[in-house]
Image (cartoon, rainbow, N blue to C red):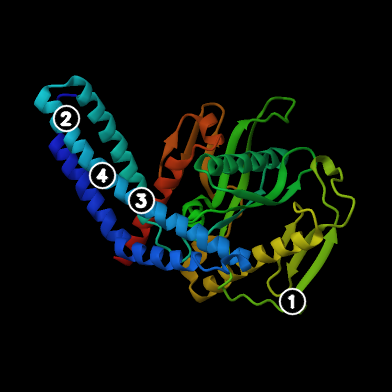
Amino acid sequence: MADIDFSAEIRALRAKYDSIEAVTDVEAIRAEIADLSEQAGEPNLWDDTVAAQQITSRLSHKQTELDRLSKLAARIDDLEVLVELAQDEDDEDSRVEAVKELTSLSKALDDLEVVTLLAGEWDEREAVVTIRSGAGGVDAADFAEMLLRLYLRWAERRGYPTQVLDTSYAEEAGLKSATFEVKAPYAFGTLSVEAGTHRLVRISPFDNQGRRQTSFAAVEVIPLIEQTDSVEIPDNEIRVDVFRSSGPGGQSVNTTDSAVRLTHIPTGIVVSMQNEKSQIQNRAAALRVLQSRLLLLKKEQEDAEKKAHAGDVKASWGDQMRSYVLNPYQMVKDLRTEHEVGNTSAVFDGEIDDFIDAGIRWRANNRNSSEA
């Protein structure tokens, strides 16, 4: 503890804070907060509920962003005072507290630095995530359900609201596919590094001979469209099919044809929704996701490099971006960033922030290299 050069550490913290503040553009945030506050104060704000929620949500996010910066600056100042107190009075308790605060501040600044790397065109958007089982039969379907729980737990840990839009259950166990929204600013930019093929290796609980099984699941992440986005879809380009919602094992959970499947005829894109109570609600949710996918497709066609946002995910050998190994050893490893952990239970319980942070930094480094 006595070997820590607090002066050098505090200088490093201030330097990192200054670089984050410069990239963040505090004045622009203050200007946006002022504009959003004015809109939020309009007497007819809630005449349009959707627009009002967007305004208040963004205002809250920007205020939180500014408050976080201000509090971090104050914490660095307080740390400097605490260190001076510890040194002047040779106070061991204050020295211990200073070390703890130094570690905490370093982590907070690292986390905030990652946020500054989310500068893509749609990174600020909310996200629509689809998980599909791939090669591996019933184990793959079970793996898809494990990944769904993983991401929902991750969102819950962060306090991000989610809404499951569609679940298609497999015959024996698990899911064929599931689609859900993450309703938080920067959800797309954050989760987009999770897009790709995930691979699971374990002793199959479905194999009566107890053999090791490799299975795959694909994760697709797209940005949620906003009202200002222009994605017009002529009625004659959409085929609408309605059917009854079903639960695990094919049991009916709805006695009316409330589930909706939309097929975009020109592209072949299919979106199914069954988790809302009415056909109208399911159709609206399906249309929103279809528009999001078409928006992304349109942008990708304009710029081929943007295919990385959703990608062509095959969910099979040779295409995986992360491996989850439960046997013969325990390890989760990202094949792009080389980040790995041995606590697989924690990962499947939603503790993936380190993987996401490493993925965001890896993506930013690749972008910088390609631009150099």
Rate crowding at label 1 as few (under 14), some (14 to 19) or many (20 or more) other CA atoms within 10 Å: few
- Give yes or no for contact between labels 1 and 3 (Cβ–Cβ under 8 Å): no
The amino acid on which the numbered mark 3 sits, given as a three-letter code, is Asp
Residue type pointed to by label 4: Ala
Vertical side of 278 occupied by 89: above or below: above
**Which residue corresponds to mark 4?**
74
At label 2, which amino acid type do we have?
Ile
Q: Residues within 10 Å of mark 4 (few under 14, many from 20)?
A: few
Q: Nearer the viewer, residue 319 or 364?
A: 364
With respect to residue 258, does 74 lie above or below? above
Give, as a three-letter code, the residue at label 1: Glu
**Residue 51 appears anywhere in the view:** yes
Of all residues shown, which one is farthest toward the left?
88
Contact check, label 1 and label 2, Cβ < 8 Å: no
Q: Secondary structure at mark 4?
A: helix
Nearer the observer: mark 1 or 4; the answer is: 4
Image side of residue 290 versus residue 39, left or right: right
Point out which mark residue 237 bears: 1
Q: Are marks 2 and 3 in contact (CB under 8 Å)?
A: no
Q: Nearer the viewer, residue 172 or 102?
A: 102
- Asked whether disc 1 touches disc 4, contact meaning CB atoms under 8 Å apart, the reply is no
Q: CA distance from mark 2 to mark 3?
A: 29 Å
Residue beneath disc 3: 67
Asked whether disc 3 touches disc 4, contact meaning CB atoms under 8 Å apart, the reply is no
